[in-house]
């Protein structure tokens, strides 16, 4: 049982480059989330999708876009990466408030 | 959205019981209280969830008073491996926001 799978695990980008972080869950959950976590800080919600076909902004949406491709997949796109987006990104899914998290993507923007 | 307030850090010793309290004065009728644990370089892990009174599982207990404006996570007989950050969340579904959490350090 894979749970929540994120790809890639590590990525280095140059300023201005774009990339998409992928997330897939196999638990048939309706809700999916993207968070970022900076060193020594708590998680901050970037975007979430309460159900297939809907997406909503969280605390820190600027500089990001998301796509809920289907019930299983929720991607996060950085159109023009900036050093301030260097962080660990976590994807999660839940049916209500018991969320399951992926292993994270460590992104460095230089 | 109900905002939560937790202590930034706590220290304990192996074998002690640890209680972490979370304040959530603006909790809504439909909101549940959920606690997560996070180890370094890992995503948070669900510990326990409750709506009112007391909930107990194999890992922890959650105490919620009648007014639901606070909750207390109780970890019995902690060990070194319980050193982690603990987050309290309040909500129903959808917009799940984590605060700064409580950094628990268990000492030998």
Image: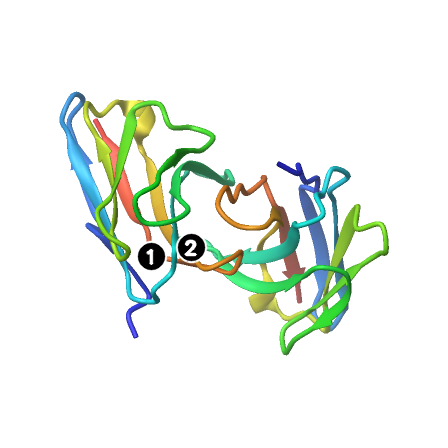
- Neighbourhood count class around disc 1 (C-alpha, 10 Å): few under 14, some 14–19, many 20 upward: many
Quadrant for the C terminus of chain B, please.
Answer: bottom right
- Read off the residue under disc 2: B43
In the rendered image, the vertical position of residue B48 relative to residue A35, given as above or below: below
In the rendered image, the vertical position of residue A30 relative to residue A57, given as above or below: below
- Neighbourhood count class around disc 2 (C-alpha, 10 Å): few under 14, some 14–19, many 20 upward: many
Quadrant for the N terminus of chain B, please.
Answer: top right
Indicate the position of residue B33 as horizontal and vertical percent values: 66, 54
Indicate the position of residue A100 as horizontal and vertical percent values: 42, 60
Marks 1 and 2, how far apart at CA: 6 Å
State the residue in front, B79 or A60: A60
Decide if residue B1 is on the left or right side of residue A26: right
Residue at figure coordinates x 55%, y 43% from the top left:
B98
State the residue in front, B52 or B48: B52
Residue at figure coordinates x 40%, y 35% from the top left:
A56
Specify the quadrant of the image occupied by residue B19.
bottom right
| Residue B16 tag number | none
Q: How is the image coloured?
A: rainbow
Specify the quadrant of the image occupied by residue A87.
top left
| Residue A103 tag number | 1
Q: Chain of mark 2?
A: B
Looking at this view, name the residue that lies furthest to the bottom: B58
Q: Identify the element where label 2 is drawn.
A: loop
Q: How many marks?
A: 2
Q: Chain of mark 1?
A: A
Decide if residue B49 is on the left or right side of residue A33: right
Residue at figure coordinates x 21%, y 26% from the top left:
A110
Q: Are marks 1 and 2 in contact (CB under 8 Å)?
A: yes
Q: Identify the element where label 1 is drawn.
A: loop
Indicate the position of residue B87 as horizontal and vertical percent values: 60, 50
State the residue in front, A104 or A32: A32
Indicate the position of residue A52 as horizontal and vertical percent values: 32, 49
């Amino acid at each position: 049982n894979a749970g929540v799978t994120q790809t890639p695990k590590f990525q280095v980008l140059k300023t201005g480059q774009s990339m998409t972080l992928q997330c897939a869950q196999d638990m048939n959950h309706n809700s999916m989330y993207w968070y970022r976590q900076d060193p020594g800080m708590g998680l901050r919600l970037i975007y979430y999708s309460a159900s297939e076909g809907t997406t909503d902004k969280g605390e820190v949406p600027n500089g990001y876009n998301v796509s809920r491709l289907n019930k299983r997949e929720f991607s996060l796109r950085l159109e023009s990466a900036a050093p301030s987006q260097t962080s660990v990104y976590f994807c999660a899914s839940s049916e209500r408030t018991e969320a399951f998290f992926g292993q994270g993507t460590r992104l460095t923007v230089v | 959205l109900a905002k939560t307030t937790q202590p930034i850090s706590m220290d304990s010793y192996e074998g002690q019981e640890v209680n972490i309290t979370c304040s959530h004065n603006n909790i809504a009728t439909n909101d549940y209280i959920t606690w997560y644990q996070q180890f370094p370089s890992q995503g948070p892990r669900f510990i326990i969830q409750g709506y009112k009174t007391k909930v107990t599982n194999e890992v922890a207990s959650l105490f919620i008073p009648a007014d639901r404006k606070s909750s207390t996570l109780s970890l019995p007989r902690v060990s070194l491996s319980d050193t982690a950050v603990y987050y309290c969340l309040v909500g129903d579904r959808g917009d799940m926001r984590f605060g700064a959490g409580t950094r628990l350090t268990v000492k030998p």
